[in-house]
Image (cartoon, rainbow, N blue to C red):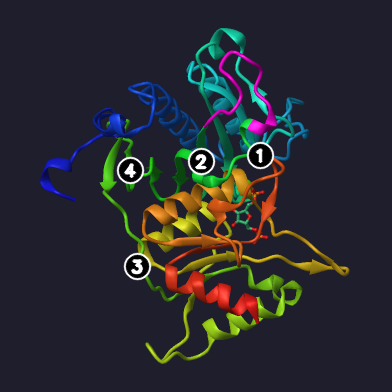
Amino acid sequence: MVAEEIGTTLSQHIIRTQDKFPQASGRFTRVFNELATCGKIISSYVRRAGIVEITGKQGTTNIQGEEQAKLDVIAHNIFMNRILKTGLIAAVSSEESDEIIEAKEEFSRNASYVISTDPLDGSSNIDVNVSVGTIFSLMKRKTPIGERCTKEDFLQPGTAQVAAGYILYGSSTIFTYTSGHGVYCFTLDPTVGEYILSHSKMKIAEAGNIYSVNEGNRKYWDKGDQQLLDYFQGNHADNDKPYTGRYIGSLVADFHRNILKSGIYLYPRATKNGKKDSGKLRLLYEASPLAFIAEQAGGLATDGATRILDIVPTEIHQRVPLYIGSKREVELAGKFGQE
Ligand code: AHM
Ligand code: MG
C-alpha cells in the first residue's frame, strides 16, 4: 500500500472511485455504506454468539419459551431491511429465501440494480466459533425500471456483475470488494467503527501450494477429482513435496486465505446412489461473486470445464461444482477433469 492510501476508509474509497462504477454516478456510495453497515451489525452478533441466543436452530424456543432465530435468518433480515431501502436496489435474491424479494414501490421507482446474496455463509460454523462470511453480487436489472422484477433480472452470467464482495467475520472483520478495477480489502477497526483499507489491489499468486477441499467426500467424486487429490498429495518436480491441505469449511474464509497465501479451493460434484449432483455451492451468490474477485486478483474460477463467469444461470439457487484460486492449480483441475 502506498503512503497516501494509509488510513483510507471504505466510504472514502468508494467516493473516490465511484466514477468507475458504470452508469451509477455517485449512487453506489449509499449501497456500499448500507452493505458495510450490515457487516458491522452482523459482526456484532457474531462476536456475541454464545452470549446472545443465536446459535440454536430456527423454530426452537429458549428457556423463557421465546423463539430463537438462527444467525443466518437474522443476517438475512438485516440485509433486507437495509439494502431494499437504498432506492437503487429493486430486488434481492438470498440463500435464505426461495423467491426473490422486491423493494417496496416507494424505494423501487428509480431502482436499476439487483443484488444476490448469501447473508451468512458457513453458518453452521457459528456454533463452534469458526469464521463465517457474507457474500454479495450486484447486477443491473434487465426488466425496465418501475416494473416488477422477475427472476430474469438475476439469471445473468457472472460477467454482468457490476460489483461483488464478501465480508469475513474472522479474527477481524474485513470487507473485500471489486467493481472490476482491482480488489480492495478493508479491515473493521472496532475502536473507530470504520473499515480501513488494509489490502490494496490484492493479487493471488499464479501458482500455489495449498489445496482446500472436504476430503471426506472423496469416494463420491469423479475419477479426475480423485486423481487431482492424489497429485496434490504426491511429490512435485517444482518443490519436491506435497501440497499443504487447509480446509476451514467456510467458503469465504478458505477463499480469503487462498488469495493471501495462494492455492485452490474446490467443491467437486458428487455421485451418490448412482445420481450425479451439481456440486454444493450456489452459482449466483457464492461461486459467481467470488469468481469475479478471483479473476480481478489474477486468479481463475471454473466448474471444472467452463469459466464460472460465463455460465448462464437457469435457476436462482442453481448449484455448480467450483474450482477457484491460483491459475495454475485451477487449470490443472480442468486437465484432470478431462481424463
Ligand atoms: P452454506 O451456504 O449452507 O453455509 O454452505 C456453504 C458452505 C461453504 O461455506 C463451505 O465451503 C461448504 O459449505 C462446506 O461444506 P461441507 O461441510 O460439505 O464441506
Ligand atoms: Mg452459503
Q: Can you tell which mark lies on residue 205? A: 3
Q: Residue at x 41, y 50 (%)?
A: 171
How many marks on residues? Answer: 4
Can I make out residue 38 in this image? yes
Q: In the rendered structure, which amino acid carries the disc numbered 3?
A: Ala
User: SS class of the residue under badge 1?
Assistant: loop
Q: In the rendered structure, which amino acid carries the disc numbered 2?
A: Ala
Circle 1 crowding by C-alpha within 10 Å: few under 14, some 14–19, many from 20? many
Q: In the rendered structure, which amino acid carries the disc numbered 4?
A: Thr
Labels 3, 4: front one: 3
Q: Is residue 239 left or right of residue 64?
A: left
Residue annotated with mark 1: 95
Q: In the rendered structure, which amino acid carries the disc numbered 1?
A: Glu
Is the shortest distance between ligand 2 and the CB of mark 1 under 8 Å? yes
Q: Is residue 251 left or right of residue 20?
A: right
Magenta span contains residue 148: yes
- Viewer-proximal residue, 311 or 46? 311
Tell me the distance, in whole angstroms, between the alpha carbons under discs 3 and 1: 31 Å
Labels 3, 1: front one: 3
Q: Residue furthest top?
A: 106
User: SS class of the residue under badge 2?
Assistant: helix
- Viewer-proximal residue, 67 or 290? 290
